[in-house]
């Protein structure tokens, strides 16, 4: 038994977490610090080193941390080598419809899971959005929404990988259950963004389409290599991520200085630490008995399973401004009450993700709104109905599959 009872330890630790989030401390530092505080309050001092050792040597933790580092490294290399710019340029020259261009470009850039990455696609879609005479609120909505439609089914998404690791559900099972939700997100996004918006006439793109297509596929090949390695060959994501890095280095042939630039970026280490912090917090919550106590409280409240799976991760994702944070906190909270099956894990994931997507603490949302000089009120009139329809689709999938 620690210094205080498990429930008090939980309240104090999560109050500390809330302060850290409010102060915008790095998520990795926040999760790790919260896990350390919770362990000090709720566990015998002699037990704490074992928990840290078990977490650090756990094969699942090592795989998750390695995969996160590899994916972040690939994202930064795409940016530093300029390959991401070639990808977007070739796509805009191949596709003749401005509506498709402003929808696809954020999604393509979204394949690079960089914090605040929507700011990368904002200037790329601006010219096409101006052709369609979209106002600032629509430009902001299109850039944010379509950037995030890919992640529910993207096997290289750190949030999906984290959810699979924490719930012990296969990545494939989670992705299958998100396909319908992703389709619904694309459909509602296209409908809301382009309702009564006329297609630009005579949109003829100059250039050699065959050459552009080859260049696009070449730029896209590192990501394709990762997906092929995971989905077809069954290679672990942690290894597949570095296969993608190797392919990118082969096609870009960057200088030594450019190749080393990502290692100077603090974001790589912050996100990697967040992956470790999530696993550590989960381990401490379980070993300290906090999850059991919390599970009993929730169970005694007779709260419906669907309500729990929707509200807890959605609220946490919204408050923390991070789907990883929402997942990392809600899984151990609910583990004592719920059995994680593919449908429950799938609903929990999408709830945390959608809660984060609409949060004013969401970095992509804030940066894009600032770029297009859009007040948040103008954005939310499109965002809220989109989120409602997406949540409804997720509930339907949970009930039927």
Image (cartoon, rainbow, N blue to C red):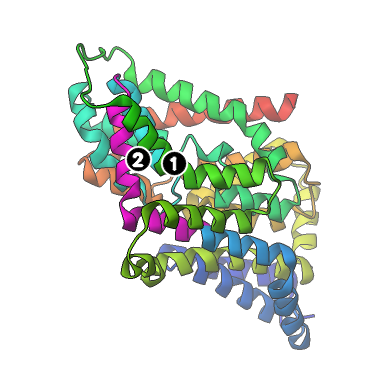
Q: Can the viewer see residue 239?
A: yes
Residue depicted at x 26% and y 38%: 124
Residue 264 against residue 182 in the figure, above or below:
below
The segment highlighted magenta reads 71-96
Residue 313 against residue 12 in the figure, above or below:
above
Left or right: where 336 falls relative to 236: right
Query: Are the residues at dot 1 and dot 2 in contact (C-beta closer than 8 Å)?
Result: yes
Left or right: where 177 falls relative to 366: right
Residue 87 bears which disc, if any?
A: 2
Left or right: where 4 falls relative to 35: right
The x and y percentages for residue 60 are 72, 62
Q: CA distance from mark 1 to mark 2?
A: 7 Å
| In-front residue for pair 309/247 | 247
The x and y percentages for residue 286 are 76, 65
| In-front residue for pair 280/332 | 280
Is residue 85 covered in magenta?
yes
The x and y percentages for residue 384 are 43, 31
Q: Quadrant of the C terminus?
A: top right
Residue that carries the numbered disc 1 in the rendered image: 220
The numbered mark, 1 or 2, whose residue comes first in the sequence reads: 2
């Amino acid at each position: 038994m620690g210094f205080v009872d498990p429930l008090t330890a939980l309240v104090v630790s999560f109050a500390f977490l809330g302060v850290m989030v409010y102060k915008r401390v790095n998520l990795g530092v926040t999760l790790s610090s919260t896990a350390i505080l919770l362990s000090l309050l709720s566990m015998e001092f002699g037990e704490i080193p074992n928990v840290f050792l078990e977490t650090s040597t756990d094969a699942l933790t090592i795989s998750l941390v390695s995969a996160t580092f590899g994916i972040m490294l690939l994202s930064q290399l795409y940016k530093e080598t300029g390959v991401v710019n070639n990808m977007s340029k070739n796509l805009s020259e191949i596709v003749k419809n401005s509506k498709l261009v402003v929808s696809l470009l954020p999604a393509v850039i979204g394949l690079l899971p960089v914090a605040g990455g929507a700011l990368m696609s904002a200037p790329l879609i601006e010219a096409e959005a101006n052709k369609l005479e979209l106002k600032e609120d629509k430009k902001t909505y299109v850039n944010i929404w379509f950037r995030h439609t890919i992640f529910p089914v993207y096997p290289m998404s750190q949030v999906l990988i984290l959810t699979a690791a924490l719930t012990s559900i296969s990545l494939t099972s989670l992705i299958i259950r998100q396909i319908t939700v992703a389709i619904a997100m694309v459909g509602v996004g296209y409908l809301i963004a382009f309702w009564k918006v006329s297609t630009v006439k005579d949109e003829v793109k100059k250039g050699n389409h065959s050459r552009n297509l080859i260049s696009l596929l070449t730029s896209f090949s590192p990501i394709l290599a990762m997906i092929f390695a995971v989905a077809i060959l069954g290679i672990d994501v942690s290894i597949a991520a570095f296969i993608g890095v190797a392919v990118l280095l082969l096609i870009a042939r960057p200088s030594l200085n450019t190749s080393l630039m990502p290692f100077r970026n603090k974001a790589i280490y912050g996100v990697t630490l967040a992956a470790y912090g999530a696993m550590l917090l989960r381990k401490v919550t379980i070993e300290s008995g906090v999850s059991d106590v919390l599970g009993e409280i929730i169970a005694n409240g007779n709260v419906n399973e669907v309500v729990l799976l929707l509200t807890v991760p959605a609220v946490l994702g919204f408050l923390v401004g991070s789907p990883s944070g929402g997942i990392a906190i809600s899984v151990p909270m609910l583990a004592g009450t719920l059995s994680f099956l593919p449908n429950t894990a799938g609903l929990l994931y999408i709830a945390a993700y959608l809660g984060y997507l609409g949060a004013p603490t969401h970095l992509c949302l804030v940066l894009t709104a600032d770029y297009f000089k859009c007040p948040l009120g103008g954005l939310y009139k499109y965002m809220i109905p989109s989120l409602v329809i997406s949540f409804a689709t997720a509930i339907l999938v949970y009930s039927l599959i």
